[in-house]
Image: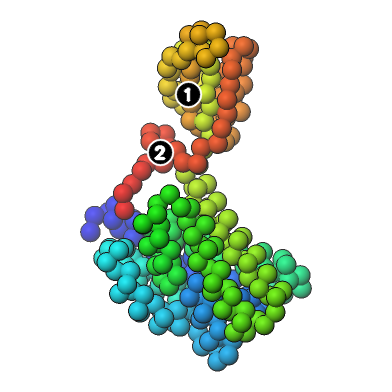
Amino acid sequence: MSSEKRKELLIDIIMDALSGLCIGVALYNFAADAKFPLTGLTGIAMIFYQYWGWKIGIMTIIMNIPLIFWAYKVLGRKFMIKSFKTMAIGTVMMDFVAPLLPRVEIDNIILNAIVVGVLTGMGYALVYMRNSSTGGADFIMMIIKAKQPHISLGRIFFIVDVVIIVIDTLAYAHSFEALCYGFIISYIGSLVVDKVMISADSGMMCMIVTNKAEAIADAIDKAVERGTTIFTAKGGYKGDVRQVLMCACSDKQMYQVNRVAKKIDVDAFIVIMESKAVYGEGFKRFKMR
């Protein structure tokens, strides 16, 4: 195994462990006592935990067995092997490490639900970022994502979970209030999944319409050491030909970029926008896993 593959494997293991810990703390330290209806096969496993005290992670793996055969053809051998690793490490962290941590008593049930949503969302996002899965409903979601790539993973996460939340509510929560908390947890979790996954590669981009593009480009390079792209554009109203300078940078660097552009050309037309992902030299390298 090459040093690069060893490094990737180590990162995978660390992410799996952190994911399992986040989800385990959310389940055992917050959700179980509050009897929140949860999502995915974890939510189904919670039924067994509430009635018979069976370990949530172990029950999740048992219920995953029939789904594995269904998902294998669509997701492929490599993805399934990574998912087995994630499930194994996650189960250990969830069932045997997280319960050892001191429980935090939160009297405010809404705050409790928010904490569960944030922790589970972070846990799932860490796994998805490594192109893996915690199994169960994740397999269903990843299959849908593979067939419908234009649909947000967070949206799939929410839709699939609605059905399981209703089942959990009928099984042990037995109240409309609990059903609402289940939806709140799922919605917060889906937002956190999308935010964590997108923000990892996000940045800022600006478009500067000016007649002094080269001077501004040099100033940007000196101020924040960022490259720029210059191209020619034609105005739609008067037909004037102007230069347009495009620059991608971090959130913190955008202030300096905006500042030097205005200093050189007070008449420059500047558009600043958030970019969901930036890849390439000076940013994160795009890797095929």
The percent position of residue 123, horizontal first and vertical second, equals 51, 64
Q: Is 284 or 160 nearer to us in this picture?
A: 160
Q: Which residue is mark 1?
A: 246
Give yes or no for contact between labels 2 and 1 (Cβ–Cβ under 8 Å).
no
What's the residue at 50%, 62% (across, down)?
157
Residue at 73% in and 67% down: 110
- Report crowding for label 2: few under 14, some 14 to 19, many 20 or more residues within 10 A (C-alpha): some
Measured as percent of width and height from the top left, residue 97 is found at 51, 76
Q: In which quarter of the view is residue 10 placed?
A: bottom left
Q: Quadrant of the N terminus?
A: bottom left
Instruction: Looking at the image, tell me whether mark 2 or mark 1 is earlier in sequence order.
Output: 1
Front in this rendered view, residue 72 or 266: 72
Q: Which residue ends up furthest to the right in the rendered image?
A: 107
Label 1 packing within 10 angstroms: few (<14), some (14-19), many (20+): some
Q: CA distance from mark 2 to mark 1?
A: 15 Å
263 left or right of 19 in image: right
User: Could you say whether the residue bearing mark 2 is in a helix, strand or loop?
Assistant: loop
Residue pointed to by mark 2: 279
- Mark number for residue 99? none
Q: Is residue 58 left or right of residue 122?
A: left
Identified by mark 1, the residue type is: Met
